[in-house]
Image (cartoon, rainbow, N blue to C red):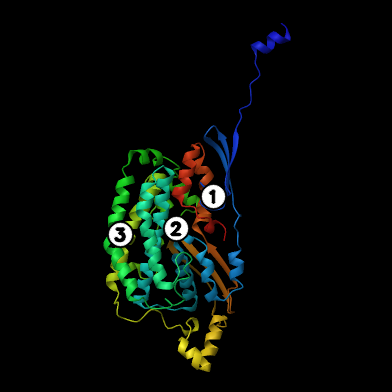
Amino acid sequence: MSETTENINHPVAEEKEYTTLNLGPTHPATHGIFQNVLKLDGEKVMHAESTLGYIHRAFEKIAEHRPYNQITPLTDRLNYCSSPLNNMGWHMTVEKLIKVKLPKRVEYMRVIVMELSRIADHIICNSIIGVDTGALTPYFYVFEWREFIYEIFEEMCGARLTTNIGRVGGFERNWNEKVWQKLDHFAKEFHKCLTEFENLLKRNRIFMDRTIGVGPIAGDRALEYGFTGPNLRAAGVDYDVRVMNPYSSYEDFDFIIPLGTNGDTYDRFMVREQEMWESYSIIKQAMGKIDRKENLFHAEVPEFYLPPKEDVYNKMEALIYHFKIVMGETDVPVGEVYHSIEAGNGELGFYLISDGGRQPYRLHFRRPCFIYYQAYPEMIKGGMLSDAILTMSSMNVIAGELDA
């Protein structure tokens, strides 16, 4: 048999060709500056590798060179979609170290701000899931209320996104009448918009087809990765820091912990949707528990509160005290504490070691995004490229929490 005839009868198998796609680091589909190197067979994801570190800012090391009251602005830049949660988590950590107990009124005020932040965070996540499935209208319907929440924050502290809201021991000022008017408007009207948003998506056939069964993860596998927050609860695991380790008097409120079953994109959407209803209920409960006329907005911790301005301008002692607080010349006890809260994306923790000096000896931020994002390559493997985008949206990956 000739060589030509042999080649015809036994053709050489061609190697399969794959496409390499850089999803990021600057890409309209990624939620921040991070990269995913995808190996594609057509539009099917065969392999994925995540790359972090594009906006690493060394927050933990910077914090070790700052006084305690100057670390709050750093926490703004973690999950910047709900920065008051980060701020207050840090304040509670310091309060735990210096053993300060807050008045109930102040704790209820914190609960209102934290639950408003949770709603703002979930609005962003769920509306973007809709956008990534091609539904742009619901995004505009619900985003006006995210804007309104930022208006409330602005009235409380003068800032909207990176709020630096509150102080160790409470708030820097009492809430004025305009804050309460805006809160009353929110409590009266928000449910209408949320209902309308759900009617547009929750039972929408196209939305359901695009999200059900997309990017699933089982509960036991999620626990192995260290998932917390809505992404864990969507997989059917009942864990919420507000219930397991209550803080800020959360034990005084009635609310349920929504759970999913399949841990897919639709479950993550629905869990966050139900959590907004629960947060809305908690806010109304807290508003009913607060005496609006009372002028109590912080605990007795003079080491962290500036003297009144008129005293600073006219009294030497007040001026000296003001200078000492601003420059962080307040020593704190020696100790080692860990405190966590239920932030928008899960358990946000602060591990703090103090040697008694003006700055932390060591400080570590436990960022929920950094932990659960490790599972992203596994969750999208075998799916379509368009589903990989949806999965990322439903996980609510915030780049500020990836790179501390």
Q: Which mark is residue 374?
A: 1
Which circle, 3 or 2, is nearer the viewer?
A: 3
**With 337 as the anchor, is 183 left or right in this view?**
left
- What residue did someone put label 2 on? 346
Q: Is 368 in front, or is 138?
A: 138
* Distance of label 3 from label 2 (alpha carbons): 24 Å
* Distance of label 1 from label 3 (alpha carbons): 35 Å
- What residue did someone put label 3 on? 190
User: Residue 88: horizontal and vertical position, in percent?
Assistant: 45, 69
Disc with the residue nearer the chain's start (2 vs 1): 2
* Distance of label 2 from label 1 (alpha carbons): 15 Å
**With 293 as the anchor, is 120 left or right in this view?**
right
Quarter of the figure with residue 62: bottom right
Dot 2 crowding, Cα within 10 Å, few <14, some 14–19, many 20+: many
Disc with the residue nearer the chain's start (3 vs 2): 3
* On screen, residue 401 above or below 5: below
Dot 1 crowding, Cα within 10 Å, few <14, some 14–19, many 20+: some
User: Residue 210: horizontal and vertical position, in percent?
Assistant: 40, 39
Under circle 2, the secondary element is strand
Under circle 3, the secondary element is helix
